[in-house]
Image (spheres, rainbow, N blue to C red):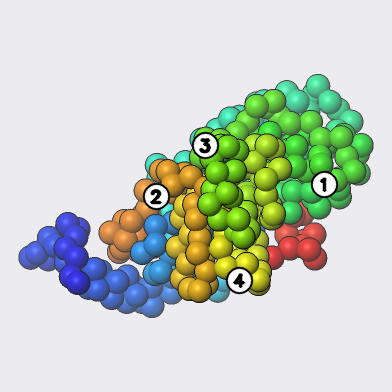
Amino acid sequence: MIVPFSVRFRGEERNTTSRSDLLERIQRLKREKKAVILAHNYQRPEVQDIADFVGDSLELSLCAMETNAEIIVFCGVNFMAETAAILNPDKRVLIPDTNALCPMASMLPADLVRLYRRKYPGAKIVLYINSLAEAKAYCDAVCTSANAPEIVNRMDSEMVLFGPDANLAKYAQKKSDKKVVPIPQYGFCPVHKLFDRDSIMLLKQSYPDAEVMVHPECDPEIWEVADFIGSTSRMYREALTSRADKFIVATEIGLLHRLRRDRRDATFIPAYEEAICVNMRLHTLEKVYLCLRDEKYEVRLPQKIVSRAREPIEFMLRNRETQR
Ligand code: 13P
Ligand code: SF4
């Protein structure tokens, strides 16, 4: 089926093209410009399909660090693209839509991190990768949902301040030996707040054999009904290796595309069909094309932030024996 798009091509007669034409143009530009497209597991299916690599936040950071490409087109929210830019000062990191922000990251401004540092001078500070680059500049280590308890455990203090996700802080507290204090007290992901325990219980009644997979950003009462808790890519690997053939999935529904594509024999049931991160979905094929064609929008951060934020991110990447 030919799907028309309304992209306006500079210096060209027509202003519509087919999807296959668009895909071809993206592939050609990628080759010509030695670019790589990285996409988060929550991206639109068509963006995941054009990407060179699809993964969770940790995998995308590792991939950004390892790539030889000269340009990285980052289809994810801005903290992810910023992390890629911090790790690759000699590469150009582009983001197709600059409005792709993570509301949870904005819940912890850098000034608040500095204030907590003064309030608890003996504590170390671990920030979830879903945080602002300016905030990362004042922390001791960064973590993702794939490694939060391990990174917290590596801190040489009894007390660890953890933000901005209070649920991930509770999860790290549960799985580590430290006293974990959430900063701020109630930071949260608006998408993962949408899951409701009773609705999941009803789904479990309809699909009694289904394995329930839950992201740690969900509330603890949702973890309690889970068979598996992990980052998006950990859920993906669990689904690929599990004996179950039905899964109830409590995370943003974008992950279901990859799950359904790579485990065709299994049924994946979203725990809530409207768990959609609108910010992640801002990137479209048209914007990916324009981003590559015009080499916009480049992620640029002040040098002071880059040099300060790099060390806590690298700390996480160095301590990666249990990761991926
Ligand atoms: P993952 O690192 O598990 O992919 O999660 C990122 C995220 O933003 C979850 O909301
Ligand atoms: Fe941020 Fe939540 Fe969207 Fe993840 S799903 S990017 S935490 S708003």
How many residues crowd mark 2 within 10 Å: few (<14), some (14–19), many (20+)? some
Element under disc 2: helix
Q: Hey, what amino acid is under mark 3?
A: Leu
* Residue at the disc numbered 2: 281
Q: Where's residue 302, x and y in %?
A: 56, 43
- Return the mark for residue 194: 3
- Return the mark for residue 285: none
34 vs 212: above or below: below
How many residues crowd mark 3 within 10 Å: few (<14), some (14–19), many (20+)? some
Residue 122 sits in quarter: top right
In this rendering, would 74 be left or right of 174?
left
| Residue located 81% across and 39% down the image | 173
Element under disc 1: helix
Q: Hey, what amino acid is under mark 2?
A: Arg
Real-space CA distance between mark 3 and mark 2, rounded to the nearest whole angstrom? 17 Å
Element under disc 3: helix
Q: Hey, what amino acid is under mark 1?
A: Lys
Asked if the residue under mark 2 is in contact with the one under mark 1, i.e. CB atoms within 8 Å, the reply is no
32 vs 278: above or below: below
* Residue at the disc numbered 4: 240
Disc 2 residue lies near ligand 2 with CB under 8 A = no
Task: Tell me the quadrant of the picture where the N terminus can be found.
Answer: bottom left
Disc 1 residue lies near ligand 1 with CB under 8 A = no
Q: Where's residue 121, x and y in %?
A: 86, 28
| Residue located 84% across and 26% down the image | 120
* Residue at the disc numbered 1: 175
Real-space CA distance between mark 1 and mark 3, rounded to the nearest whole angstrom? 24 Å
285 vs 173: above or below: below
How many residues crowd mark 4 within 10 Å: few (<14), some (14–19), many (20+)? some
Q: Nearer the viewer, mark 3 or mark 2?
A: 3
Q: Hey, what amino acid is under mark 4?
A: Leu
